[in-house]
Amino acid sequence: MKKHKALRLFMIIHVIGIQITFMTMIFRENYDTNNYAALLALFLITLLLFGHKYVDLHHSEYAYEKIAVVVLIPIGAVITYTLNNIVGLGSVLSAGIVGTTASFIPKIKKQSRYLKKLPPALYCGAFIGMSSSEITPSIYFIIAAGMVAGLFYMFSKNLFLGVGGKLGTIAFAGVVTVSLIYWLSL
């Protein structure tokens, strides 16, 4: 039971930490040029710090996504990255192709619960594959970011329920985490 609580706490702290860092960077960038944007960013940072305690975003039971579903996140990331950077279709069109194609997977067998879980995982990977080649220098970086995002996806099954942007946030957390590891290793 302690292991589950520790994983849940790690996920919440990691996601909130990344969001606070992102909002702080926005605050620092806009402080000199636009005071209203800086005040809005500071207000949003405060909401993130204290607001999550008062909103019921989590189930009380502990459940994790299956690895057979999670493995599709790096696959979706690689396909989108290939369409975006190698074929040259652009990030939005590439993610749209992957997302639209993934949406038809449950139609193969309508009674299958497993097939219904695949489109969100592939689409989460598509967000990773949309990254600029300046941020993601190689296909190996994309695979690593997809694997980290897959771990976040697996552990956050019962977290942040009903919050829009969960897949994008998971993808963002994967790319930021791998970018930080890459930056620290240089």
Image (tube, helix red, strand yellow):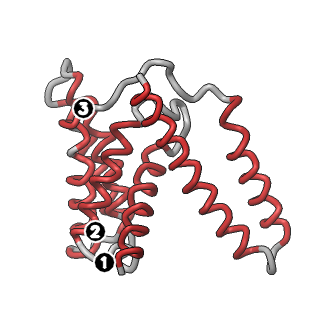
Q: Amino acid at mark 2?
A: Phe
Instruction: Classify residue 16 as left or right of residue 70.
Output: right
Quadrant of the frame with the N terminus: top left
Quadrant of the frame with the C terminus: bottom left
Judging depth in this view, the residue of 111 and 169 nearest the camera is 169
Q: Amino acid at mark 3?
A: Lys
Quarter of the image where one finds residue 82: bottom left
Instruction: Classify residue 73 as left or right of residue 5.
Output: left
- SS class, disc 2: helix
* Earlier residue among tags 1 and 3: 3
Callout 1 touching callout 3 (CB < 8 Å): no
Quarter of the image where one finds residue 172: bottom left
The numbered mark at residue 26 is none
Neighbours of disc 1 within 10 Å: few (<14), some (14-19), many (20+)? few
**Vertical comparison of 141 with 124: above or below:** below
- SS class, disc 3: loop
- Mark 2 highlights which residue? 141
- Residue 90 x, y percent position in the rendering: 34, 71
Q: Amino acid at mark 1?
A: Pro
Callout 1 touching callout 2 (CB < 8 Å): yes
- Residue 148 x, y percent position in the rendering: 32, 53
Q: Which residue sits at x=51%, y=45%?
A: 165
- Mark 3 highlights which residue? 66
- Residue 177 x, y percent position in the rendering: 42, 61
How far apart, in angstroms, are the residues tagged by discs 2 and 3? 23 Å
- SS class, disc 1: loop
- Mark 1 highlights which residue? 137
Q: Which residue sits at x=21%, y=37%?
A: 67
How far apart, in angstroms, are the residues tagged by discs 1 and 2? 7 Å
